[in-house]
Amino acid sequence: MSLENILVVSFGTGQMEDRITVNDTKTWGIIDWLNIKKGIPLLEVYADGSADLIDYIATQLLKDKYNRYQLLVPNSKEKPISTFQADPQNLANLVDVANDFLDRSEGDRQLEELAAYLSI
């Protein structure tokens, strides 16, 4: 089968809006990288890196036949969120983020474009 006959739609589980920078980590030790209160930064770097790589490769191979839906997960001191914690409060916060995304016109627009494409 040729790549022209393939459509890939990828739904991400969310990517933290605040990316970890080199300056953030200059003084970090192992405890900082595995800190649950920081959202387990080691796992986030690992997951973001592999997801970004797959996204890049799929975009290069499939061009407009590849669609990635990945919402940015905001993080604040008032409402801390991690993409790697399954406690009830964190899960409720993630549900709020997803609902906010779907409620905004951007989420609707992306899903409507996908539905229109699939109905062709």
Image: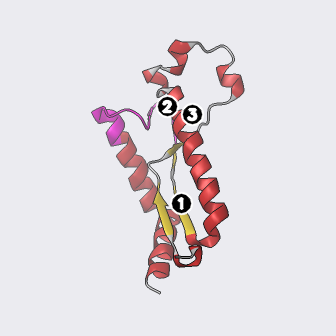
Whether residues under marks 2 and 3 lie with C-beta atoms below 8 angstroms apart, the answer is yes
Question: Could you give the CA–CA distance between mark 2 and mark 3, rounded to whole angstroms?
Answer: 5 Å
Type of the residue with mark 1: Arg
Reading the image, the residue beneath label 1 is 68
**Image mark for residue 43:** 2
Label 2 CA crowd tier, 10 Å (few <14, some 14–19, many 20+): some
Q: Is residue 117 above or below residue 97?
A: below
Q: Nearer the viewer, residue 90 or 35?
A: 35
Q: Position of residue 3 (x, y in %)?
A: 58, 73
User: Is residue 78 highlighted in magenta?
Assistant: yes
Q: Answer left or right for 11 relative to 50.
A: left
Tag 3's secondary structure? helix
**Residue 17 visible in the picture:** no
Q: Check disc 1: other Cα within 10 Å, few if <14, some if 14-19, many if 20+.
A: some
Residue 89 image point, x, y percent: 32, 34
- In this view of the protein, which residue sits in the foreground, 2 or 4? 2
Is 92 drawn above or below residue 24 in the view shown?
below
Magenta-highlighted residues: 74-92
Residue 92 x, y percent position in the rendering: 32, 41
In terms of sequence position, does the residue under pointer 1 or pointer 2 come before the other?
A: 2
Q: Please say if 76 is above or below 94.
A: above
Tag 2, which secondary structure? Answer: helix
* Residue under pointer 3: 45
Q: Residues within 10 Å of mark 3 (few under 14, many from 20)?
A: some
Amino acid type of disc 2?
Leu
* Identity, as a three-letter code, of the amino acid under mark 3: Val
Q: Could you say where residue 26 lies in the image, as x and y percent from the top left?
A: 69, 17
